[in-house]
Amino acid sequence: MLIYIAVIQKILYFGLVYPISRLPIFLIYRISDILFIILFYLVRYRRNTVDQNIKNSFPQYSVKACEKISLDFYRHFCDLVVESLKLFTLSEKSAQKRMVYKNIELIEQLSSKQKNITLMGGHYGNWELLAITINNALPYQCKAFYTPLRNLFWEDKMKQSRSRFGLQMVSIKKILSHTKEENNPLLCTIYGSDQWPRKPHKAYWTDFLNQDTGFQKGAEKFAKKNNEAVVFGKIKKIRRGYYETEFHLISEEPTLEKNDFIMESYKDMLEAQIREVPAYYLWSHKRWKHSRPNDLEL
């Protein structure tokens, strides 16, 4: 059985994913247009989840306004899917043209002080494009932690895609050992801290988008432990296929900050980013499917 599964996976990758990735950009977006009709109108992929997440996050909005966000989200989501496929074969030069970095001066100032960086971001815009371009954009060796997939074949392909241009991919299961062994004096560690926390009892709970929300605390924990400057990466979608990331300082000396200052600052920045243009957040994720553990109730 395992042999058959492995064969089917390879057929899917080399017979579908890879050929699509080799298509010209304009054809890639035609596929996105078709995929949008299928997911939004026919399959209704996670429509209930998306609609409920948007409604709960913006209770002040009218039904029509929420429906507009939902529609725009699915258009962006389908673009994100095909753009992620394109990243398997996209050239480094083309990738760099499609992700521009702003306020690099902040990063250069920190590097001149030999400060390692904890870079916090969310599932907004195209974080996959950031992953493959950021290592060559900053005067740092960049690494990112990821949650291992159940399927080892697709996990390997995901790691290959994101690490094509130098980004180090590290399983979250190895976070402790990897941090202890890392001796690079100029290291930028990337955290997508808006993911559902694997251990809710150890999460940072706060009000986010009008909902009680748990955040992973690893970024603040290790930033303080290693005294790394904390920076927020704000992704903006300029137009179809083109993005920019602007860096904002949260704290240069995290050991001097009060507990949860970093997490609360990150939450505020991410929420402000989402409120500017809500459609580009990952609303299909079941972000609020669990509640705060009873023993942590306020």
Image: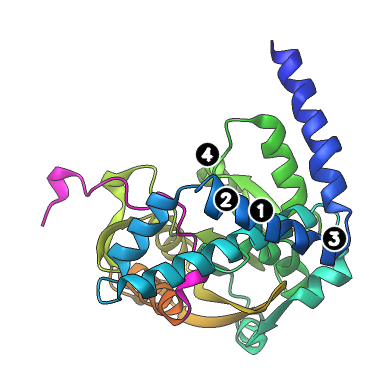
Mark 1 to mark 3: distance in Å? 21 Å
**Amino acid under disc 1:** Leu
Which comes before the other along the chain, label 1 or label 3? 1
Residue 275: % across, % down? 40, 78
Residue 156: % across, % down? 72, 38
Q: In which quarter of the image is residue 43?
A: top right
Could you tell whether 132 is left or right of 171 in the image?
right
**Amino acid under disc 2:** Leu
Q: Nearer the viewer, residue 260 or 80?
A: 80
Using the image, tell me which numbered label, if any, was put on residue 35: 1
Residue under label 4, please give it. Answer: 173
User: Does dot 3 land on a helix, a strand or a loop?
Assistant: loop
Graded by Cα atoms within 10 Å as few (under 14), some (14 to 19) or many (20 or more), the crowding at tag 2 reads some
Residue under label 2, please give it. Answer: 39
Using the image, tell me which numbered label, if any, was put on residue 62: none
Q: Is mark 1 in CB contact (under 8 Å) with mark 2?
A: yes
Which comes before the other along the chain, label 2 or label 3? 2
